[in-house]
């Protein structure tokens, strides 16, 4: 009800249009249940005294978004309730089977694990424990479920309006805790954690929500060695809450959480994972509630004389850009001087035999194909979808990856994904973590400086290739 | 054998901010009759309500420290006092009915701009005939809520936490030579959300305190239903989950409002409420169980070397106290009615009349012999400090107090008690001749004086309490 007869009608702000980051794309979304049978070996904890799962806390899912370009070409982002893809051989096989079934190139799929530590590891090369006989079947289930979800998502492709927004969630804390001369993986109250939550709301052209994307960085380690249930950890409850509220699937993408976890963790209590999920779920719902209506921006409507002089902004329809620019960067990083397996056995000789075996197995399988001092490539996929940019890589990067990229590119909507595709499943710690020394620095095969190099290369690419936001 | 079992961090205990005291909480509906005068918006063509969007309530929280004198923190889903006579007509009666001293009560208005009028001098205007009886009913319900809270008070543990909520935006928008009240995308807004969860000794939630700064101006001149604005839906969401009353406290929101507002659409108020409600629920989920802290107990050799923090019960801090300070504040040169009429001669006659009436009522009881003092109430509950004052302070009031007292949880309340029902803007607001600077009677520099005086009082208060604690030997 702006008054055109107001004596102050001439007053206008510098910019008369405001909107959130948006994209207008052709997308489809689908979700498939991949919960394995109870009894399967589940969990990845060296301290665990059991291997066979006894129940399901929340089901495991693969959620897929398919996008289509003007020529009909399709690419996919899949988020799956897995810890990691297993060893290099198993992970590569799994991805190859999926892309082969779909008839797509390996770079057409971002396959991203949510990192729940209470799921079966899809790897057939671990030592045989109770329940491991069900793992090959689970691998088949992952392949079939992902292919099915991709095909359904492709069938569901339609014109959509996506609204992107940053929110905040304080579930994550820093987990690098100095204890004298060493660091242990536990809540550190003295270092603030990145609390950024990135959310995308996908709506059809009628304005109905058809999907949500949530990107948040926090190790799903609520449940640990005392838990005997298959669980997506906190992601399950968060997803359940958001899906109940929106009536549409939610795709969760684990952020750069190498140094982040919940404050309370290593528990056997499923209710604690649900409380963590409710924290994240409510934060996502708050962020969704704060968005403008789908496909709308705010436009200055003029002055209203009331008790005060008021200015009116009104929602009007608009459309975000449809730009699709997707690339893979192969960042050169150096392998550190690795200690021999024998030396590692000697160093860990005093610890619990099960924990020792878990560590040795991880170390052996991790270093296949890597040699000390070698220069290797760490793949990073940078996908621009309208006004959102997805930066995905296979490692467990520290939160520096996302905070630094967002700091260097203010105003840009950046989703950062750990544990996506292969190869390169190891930590990407900051230089300071090597000095500490933190677990992540001795777990990784990479030399200090690797995460900094990834940031440099991605930032350089973004600045050179991605245009700024244009508001009409 | 864990060869690293002895590893410990420097600090092995982490405690959330807390308080332990006798407390009770109660909520009552005080919906006004349809047809009551509203009159929050000069631009409205009708000034009477046509219905109730969401319940208008009063919520009373009583806290009874060891010395036995109860302090009442009471919210009402009303807008603001136009003058001292209106304030005392309600607050004075509540004080009298409860038989307490003035400083034992912080009567806080949540600042909805869609509430029934608080004015006691409008019987002659449309809808004004309902006001006196409604106010009498509201007073009896406020008193009833206070008494019910008192009668049901128990030993309670409060857990405090800061969260974030991005409902509020900056609302001082530069339009060339002048600023207007509208969303300004270029200035970030304070997004601090302060939450207190009150539990009995069994851990059952008795109530939730929420302090957030954002003008409830979603609903405006095109709305004719009474409503707590976004506070209503936020409260409903939180209460549905906690099964306990939520007490909302409007923060220092002089420069803050929702991005989407000035609307007639009650669904939009609900949408804004969901932003705050979900953000509040997120904060509640992060809290440890009542009266628990965590202790680093041991390391665990797993795939990595892990450290375990284990929950353990503890007795939250119990220091409490209450003081009032009166801050001498400078006044602007105050224009006469004739000068105001000349100033606003070109605007709509209804809007002009509203502005002039408000300007005159503001002065009564506050400007005495050309000078004024601004009252500030400071209550300490364990690790939290509650700062209430009658004005509409800019958000700098809370951001600066929180910066200076980062070791405490600071709750900051606008629209609390009186007199001094006026904006307390930053110097920049005076330079830009914003609405808030010409609405107020205070001269530039007042906000800084109030901040400094409050800061000094908090510091001296905390020192005094520490001395008392040492002397009395608790904690």
Image: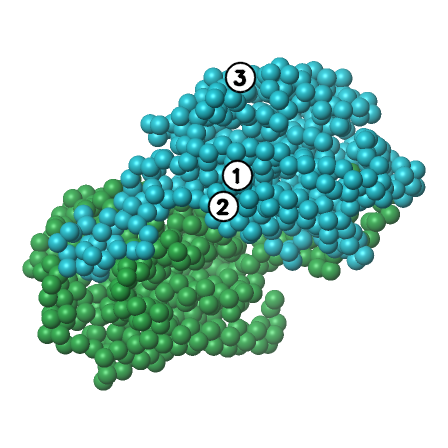
Chain colours: A cyan, B green
Residue shown at 66%/44% (left/top)?
A: A454
Which element type, helix, strand or loop, lies under badge 3?
A: helix
The picture quadrant where one finds residue B78 is bottom left
Horizontal and vertical percent for residue A296? 33, 38
**Camera-nearest label, 3 or 1:** 1
Residue with the mark numbered 2: A412
Secondary structure category for the residue under label 1: strand
Chain ID of residue with mark 2:
A
Chain letter behind tag 1: A
Look at mark 3 in the image and give the residue it sits on: A151
Question: Which element is circle 2 on?
Answer: loop
The answer to which image quadrant residue B239 occupies is top left
Q: Which residue is mark 1?
A: A389
Residue at the image position 77 percent from the left and 21 percent from the top: A124
Q: Earlier in the sequence, mark 2 or mark 3?
A: 3
User: In the image shown, does A198 or B336 lie closer to the viewer?
Assistant: A198
Report how far apart the C-alphas of labels 2 and 3 lie in the structure: 31 Å
| Same-subunit check for callouts 2 and 3 | yes
Q: Report if the CB atoms under discs 1 and 2 are less than 8 Å apart.
A: yes
């Amino acid at each position: 009800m702006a008054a055109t007869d107001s004596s102050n009608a001439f007053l206008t702000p510098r910019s008369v249009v405001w909107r959130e980051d948006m994209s207008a794309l052709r997308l489809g979304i689908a979700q498939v249940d991949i919960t394995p049978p109870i009894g399967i070996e589940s969990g990845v904890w060296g301290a665990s005294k059991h291997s066979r799962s006894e129940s399901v806390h929340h089901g495991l899912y693969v959620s897929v978004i398919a996008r289509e370009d003007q020529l009909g070409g399709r690419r996919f982002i899949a988020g799956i309730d897995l810890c990691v893809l297993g060893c290099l051989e198993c992970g590569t096989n799994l991805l190859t089977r999926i892309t082969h079934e779909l008839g797509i190139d390996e770079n057409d799929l971002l396959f991203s694990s949510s990192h729940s530590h209470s799921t079966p590891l899809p790897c057939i090369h671990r030592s045989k424990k109770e329940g491991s006989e069900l793992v090959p079947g689970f691998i088949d289930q992952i392949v079939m479920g992902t292919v099915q979800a991709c095909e359904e998502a492709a069938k569901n492709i339609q014109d959509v309006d996506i609204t992107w927004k940053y929110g905040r969630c304080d579930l994550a804390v820093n987990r690098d805790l100095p204890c004298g001369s060493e660091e242990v993986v536990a809540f550190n109250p003295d270092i603030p954690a990145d609390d950024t939550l990135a959310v995308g709301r996908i709506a059809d052209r009628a304005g109905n929500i058809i999907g949500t994307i949530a990107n948040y960085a926090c190790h799903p380690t609520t449940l640990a060695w005392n838990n005997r249930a298959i669980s997506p950890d906190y992601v399950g409850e968060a997803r359940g809450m958001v899906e109940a509220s929106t009536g549409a699937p939610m795709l969760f993408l684990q952020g750069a959480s190498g140094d982040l976890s919940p404050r309370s963790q290593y528990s056997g209590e499923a209710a604690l994972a649900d409380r963590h999920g409710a924290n994240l779920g409510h934060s996502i719902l708050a962020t969704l509630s704060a968005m403008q209506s789908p496909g709308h921006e705010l436009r200055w409507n003029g002055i209203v004389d009331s008790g005060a002089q008021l200015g009116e902004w009104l929602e009007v329809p608009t459309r975000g850009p449809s730009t699709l620019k997707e690339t893979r960067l192969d960042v050169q990083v150096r392998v550190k001087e690795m200690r021999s397996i024998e030396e590692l056995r000697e160093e860990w000789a005093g610890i619990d035999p099960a924990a020792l075996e878990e560590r040795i197995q991880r170390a052996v399988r991790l270093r296949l194909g890597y040699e000390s001092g070698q220069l290797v490539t760490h793949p990073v996929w940078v996908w621009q979808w309208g006004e959102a940019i997805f930066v995905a890589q296979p490692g467990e990067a520290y939160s520096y990856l996302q905070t630094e990229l967002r700091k260097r590119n203010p105003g840009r909507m950046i989703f950062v994904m750990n544990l996506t595709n292969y190869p390169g499943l190891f930590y990407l710690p900051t230089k300071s973590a090597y000095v500490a020394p933190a677990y992540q620095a001795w777990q990784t095969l990479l030399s200090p400086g690797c995460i900094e190099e990834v940031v440099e290369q991605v930032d350089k690419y973004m600045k050179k290739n991605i245009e700024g936001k244009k508001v009409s | 054998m864990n060869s690293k079992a002895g590893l410990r961090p420097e600090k092995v205990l982490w405690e959330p901010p807390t308080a332990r005291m006798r407390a009770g909480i109660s909520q009552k509906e005080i919906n006004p009759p349809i047809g009551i005068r509203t009159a929050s918006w000069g631009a409205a063509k009708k000034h009477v309500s046509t219905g109730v969007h969401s319940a208008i309530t009063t919520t009373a929280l009583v806290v009874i420290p060891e010395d036995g004198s109860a302090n009442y923190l009471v919210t009402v889903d009303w807008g603001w006092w136009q003058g001292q006579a209106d304030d005392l007509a309600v607050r004075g009666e509540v004080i009298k009915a409860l038989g307490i001293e003035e400083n034992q009560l912080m009567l806080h208005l949540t600042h909805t701009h869609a509430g029934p009028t608080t004015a006691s001098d409008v019987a002659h205007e449309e809808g004004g005939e309902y006001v006196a009886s409604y106010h009498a009913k509201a007073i009896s319900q406020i008193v009833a809520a206070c008494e019910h809270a008192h009668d049901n008070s128990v030993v309670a543990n409060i857990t405090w936490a800061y969260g974030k909520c991005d409902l509020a935006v900056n609302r001082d928008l530069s339009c060339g030579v002048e600023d207007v009240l509208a969303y300004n995308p270029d200035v970030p807004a304070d997004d601090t959300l302060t939450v207190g969860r009150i539990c009995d000794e069994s851990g059952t939630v008795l109530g939730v305190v929420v302090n957030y700064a954002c003008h409830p101006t979603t609903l405006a001149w095109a709305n004719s239903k009474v409503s707590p604005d976004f506070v209503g839906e936020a409260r409903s969401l939180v209460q549905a989950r906690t099964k306990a009353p939520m007490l909302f406290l409007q923060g220092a929101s002089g420069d803050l409002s929702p991005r989407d507002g000035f609307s007639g659409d009650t669904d939009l108020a609900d949408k804004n409420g969901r932003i705050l409600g979900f953000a509040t629920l997120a904060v509640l989920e992060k809290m440890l169980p009542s009266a628990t802290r965590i202790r680093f107990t041991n390391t665990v050799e797993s795939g990595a070397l892990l450290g375990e923090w284990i929950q353990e019960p503890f007795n939250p801090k119990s220091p409490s106290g209450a003081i009032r300070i009166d801050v001498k504040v400078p006044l602007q040169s105050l224009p006469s009615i004739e000068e105001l009429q000349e100033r606003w001669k070109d605007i709509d006659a209804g809007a002009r009349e509203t502005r002039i009436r408000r300007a005159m009522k503001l002065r009564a009881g506050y400007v005495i012999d050309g000078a004024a003092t601004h009252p500030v109430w400071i209550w300490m509950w364990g690790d939290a400090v509650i700062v209430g004052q009658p004005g509409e302070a800019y958000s700098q009031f809370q951001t600066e107090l929180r910066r200076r007292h980062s070791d405490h949880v600071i709750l900051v309340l606008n629209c609390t008690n009186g007199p001094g029902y006026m904006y307390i803007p930053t110097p920049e607001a005076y330079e830009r001749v914003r609405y808030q600077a010409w609405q107020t009677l205070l001269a530039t520099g007042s906000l800084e004086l109030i901040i400094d005086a409050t800061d000094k009082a908090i510091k001296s208060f905390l020192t005094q309490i520490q001395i008392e604690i040492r002397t009395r030997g608790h904690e």
